[in-house]
């Protein structure tokens, strides 16, 4: 089967990769590029564990093909921290114990970052609706929402 | 059986020629917009290899054009993008609401109303809203474009009028005059992200005295395809869209419904609920037209 050559940018770095035409972006990230921070929960668009940003817009990487990534800017969980310095969302998730098994966490962090990038001061309802596409079977969501609220507050102080 | 392939045409002509040569070679093609239905189907109910034709790199399918008498929405514009367009939201609040009901933030970053229409599910939430708003499908094919009213586009569960060498460019809507409003409501057992048990879309215009001069009502998830219900629109025209008129429109919707019983609801339940949704959506559309 003819593989397709794709040039894309992942976390600001240009990457070239050969994809099967029907391979999901999630599989390309994990299996071809070795970036396993992005998780697979369902592969049907229901759980949000595979969330990434494409040109700044939040999407499920399991519902996008690798070949569709030609020429776009992808941000994955690996691009959220600044080197060894955690992003405030990552710190707040730790402080609030907003994770247990952690499979959902990369997706929540990427999704929450997309929210705070466009809306720095979301209320609780907005946060809950925005994150409704991210499922967590462990935490009961409350700690996640608190962590995002706290991160928003800290970002507001910094600004 | 062939292999999967991917094509990324950048013009309508190129897309049509990809479709035509595949048809000639007896190869299967599949149009790809946001992919939120297609990718799931490729991994479950329909694994046959085919050529995926990505329509997201064609100017026409990405266009949102708001003219003085007409609005055009390209088939591949993601609902997240539509939802951020304040002007469009002010013109067709009901249509945008229907798109906003489908899926999570992540899904709305890719899914399009054109894709919802082409997927042609009986329960597609945007379809009754598109029909109510008077949407006309603009279809590209080998001999140019043709137009089909949205209510005539669907032919059955998952099927539509598109031929092998055709694809949907977008939808044209007449721009509603002053004192117009539209609304879409669906019923689901939870508050978010579920498939409609029943849905109803209403679009109407009022005159200066608040009398309804034009109304279109469409229903979803209660028949093999979404349906325009002319009798429901007629029940509203010439009235102040008061409770009696809304009740008559709701009764017309219930009468037009021919639902099935499945895990989401029974025949009796869906027939009742679709009438209720029509009444409520009609009242919202009226209040929007009155500017309340
Ligand atoms: S793995 Fe993509 S949404 Fe679950
Ligand atoms: S921490 Fe386990 S699923 Fe969220």
Image (cartoon, rainbow, N blue to C red):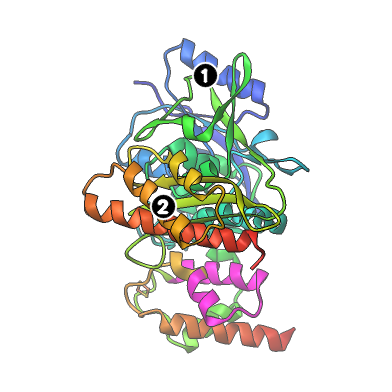
| Residue B253 x/y as whole percent | 38, 47
- Could you confirm whether marks 1 and 2 are on the same chain? yes
Q: Are marks 1 and 2 in contact (CB under 8 Å)?
A: no
In this orientation, which residue lies closer to the viewer: B138 or B35?
Answer: B138
Q: What element carries label 1?
A: loop
- At a point 25% along the width and 56% down the height, the residue shown is B269
Tell me the quarter of the image containing the N terminus of chain B.
top left
Q: Give the range drawn in magenta.
A: A105-129
| Magenta: main secondary structure | helix
Residue B160 appearing in the image = yes
* Left or right: where B191 falls relative to B258: right
Q: Which chain carries label 2?
A: B
- At a point 47% along the width and 20% down the height, the residue shown is B164
Q: Is mark 2 on a helix, strand or loop?
A: helix
| Residue B191 x/y as whole percent | 39, 68
Report the Cα–Cα distance between label 1 and label 2: 43 Å
The question of residue B177 being in magenta is answered with no
In this orientation, which residue lies closer to the viewer: B107 or B215?
Answer: B215
Q: Mark 1 points at which residue?
A: B165
| Residue B26 x/y as whole percent | 42, 13
In this orientation, which residue lies closer to the viewer: B211 or A97?
Answer: B211
Q: Which chain carries label 1?
A: B
> Which of labels 1 and 2 is toward the front?
2
């Amino acid at each position: 089967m003819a593989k397709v050559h794709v040039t894309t940018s992942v976390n600001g770095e240009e990457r070239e990769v050969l994809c099967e035409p029907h391979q999901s972006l999630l599989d390309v990230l994990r299996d071809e590029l070795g970036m396993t921070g992005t998780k697979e929960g369902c592969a049907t668009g229901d759980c949000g564990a595979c969330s990434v940003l494409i040109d700044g817009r939040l999407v499920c990487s399991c519902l996008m093909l690798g070949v569709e990534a030609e020429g776009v800017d992808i941000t994955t969980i690996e691009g959220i921290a600044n080197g060894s310095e955690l992003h405030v969302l990552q710190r707040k998730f730790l402080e609030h114990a907003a994770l247990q098994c952690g499979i959902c966490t990369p997706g929540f962090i990427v999704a929450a970052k997309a929210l705070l990038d466009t809306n720095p001061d979301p209320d609780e309802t907005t946060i809950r609706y925005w994150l409704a596409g991210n499922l967590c079977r462990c935490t009961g969501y409350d700690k996640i929402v608190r962590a995002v609220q706290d991160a928003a507050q800290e970002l507001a102080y910094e600004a | 059986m062939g292999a999967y392939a991917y094509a990324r045409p950048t013009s309508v002509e190129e897309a049509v020629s990809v479709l035509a040569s595949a048809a000639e070679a007896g190869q299967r093609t599949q149009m790809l917009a946001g992919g939120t239905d297609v990718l799931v189907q490729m991994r479950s109910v329909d694994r046959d290899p085919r050529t995926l034709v990505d329509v997201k790199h064609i100017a026409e399918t990405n266009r949102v054009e708001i003219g003085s008498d007409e609005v055009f929405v390209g088939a591949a514009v993601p609902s997240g993008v539509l939802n951020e367009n304040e002007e469009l939201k002010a013109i067709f609040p009901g249509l945008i609401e229907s798109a906003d009901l489908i899926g999570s933030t992540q899904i709305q970053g890719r899914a399009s109303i054109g894709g919802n229409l082409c997927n042609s599910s009986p329960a597609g939430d945007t379809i009754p809203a598109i029909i109510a708003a008077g949407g006309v499908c603009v279809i590209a094919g080998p001999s140019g474009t043709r137009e089909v009213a949205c209510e005539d586009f669907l032919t059955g569960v998952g099927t539509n009028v598109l031929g092998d060498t055709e694809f949907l460019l977008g939808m044209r809507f007449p721009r509603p005059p002053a004192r117009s409003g539209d609304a879409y409501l669906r019923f689901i057992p939870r508050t978010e992200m579920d498939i409609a048990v029943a849905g109803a879309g209403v679009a109407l215009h009022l005159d200066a005295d608040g009398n309804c001069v034009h109304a279109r009502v469409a229903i979803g998830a209660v028949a093999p395809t979404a349906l325009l219900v002319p009798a429901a629109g007629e029940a509203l025209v010439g009235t102040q869209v008061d409770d009696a008129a809304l009740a008559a429109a709701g009764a017309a919707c219930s009468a037009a419904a021919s639902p099935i019983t499945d895990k989401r609801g029974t025949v009796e339940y869906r027939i009742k609920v679709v009438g209720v949704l029509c009444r409520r959506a009609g009242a919202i559309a009226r209040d929007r037209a009155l500017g309340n």
